[in-house]
Image (cartoon, coloured by chain):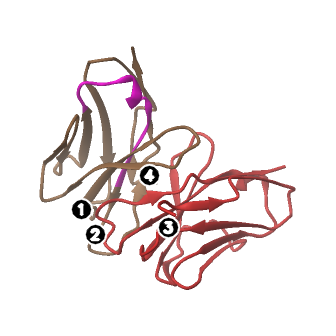
Amino acid sequence: DQQVKQNSPSLSVQEGRISILNCDYTNSMFDYFLWYKKYPAEGPTFLISISSIKDKNEDGRFTVFLNKSAKHLSLHIVPSQPGDSAVYFCAASARTSYDKVIFGPGTSLSVIP
Amino acid sequence: GAGVSQSPSNKVTEKGKDVELRCDPISGHTALYWYRQSLGQGLEFLIYFQGNSAPDKSGLPSDRFSAERTGGSVSTLTIQRTQQEDSAVYLCASSHQTGEDGYTFGSGTRLTVV
């Protein structure tokens, strides 16, 4: 049973437009959420995180929104750039226990010049 | 080094052989994690170390998989009697104890069992 779901395996966006990547989770114990970006043949790199006490966290072109009641979070990239083309993983953990982080299956983003 | 180092980067092995995958975490990171990514799949949690102890081994797929960490640093993931379904990219990550800055991943070991 997948605890972290990313229902869109892929997404294509024009350069300059907004990219919205969605993520849903099922475990109500999760209280810390992260997004990672992965290029081919490289390990994932940490992008941005959000604690459950917040509903929004912004870092430059990247903003993560959290809707706890819906168990849903999203990553917005504005404006999208060709270098943003990568696989994006949503991840979640229950900070009250330990640091095991559960990853979603990933969404492959293609930003078209 | 500055990052998480994994070796080998690629490994092709025959079915039934044992393999050892190595991870060198970032110096000072107390937490170390092993994940694997099979073709077309997400990241599957395998095992987590805090120091030298492994409080969570729940993700190891079978008793053919084992891992150890010595000196609070280097970790080795061992797969005995490899099977074709073990083929995947095995990723190691490390973090400070709290992990709130996220993990730092290595580039992974691509294991192919033929």
User: Which residue is at 13% across, 49% downward?
Assistant: A55
N-term-proximal mark, 4 vs 1? 4
Single out the mark in the foreground, 2 or 4: 2
Q: Which residues are magenta?
A: A77-91
Residue that label 2 marks: A95
Please indicate, yes or no, whether residue A22 appears anywhere in the rendered image.
yes
N-term-proximal mark, 1 vs 2? 1
Asked if disc 1 and disc 2 are in contact, CB closer than 8 Å, the reply is: yes
Asked if disc 4 and disc 1 are in contact, CB closer than 8 Å, the reply is: no
Amino acid carrying mark 2 in the image: Arg
Asked if disc 3 and disc 4 are in contact, CB closer than 8 Å, the reply is: no
User: Which residue is at 65% across, 72% downward?
Assistant: B76
B1 drawn magenta: no
Labels 2 and 4 share a subunit: yes
Where residue B34 appears, as percent x and y from the top left, is 54, 64
From the rendered image, report the letter of the chain displayed in red. Answer: B
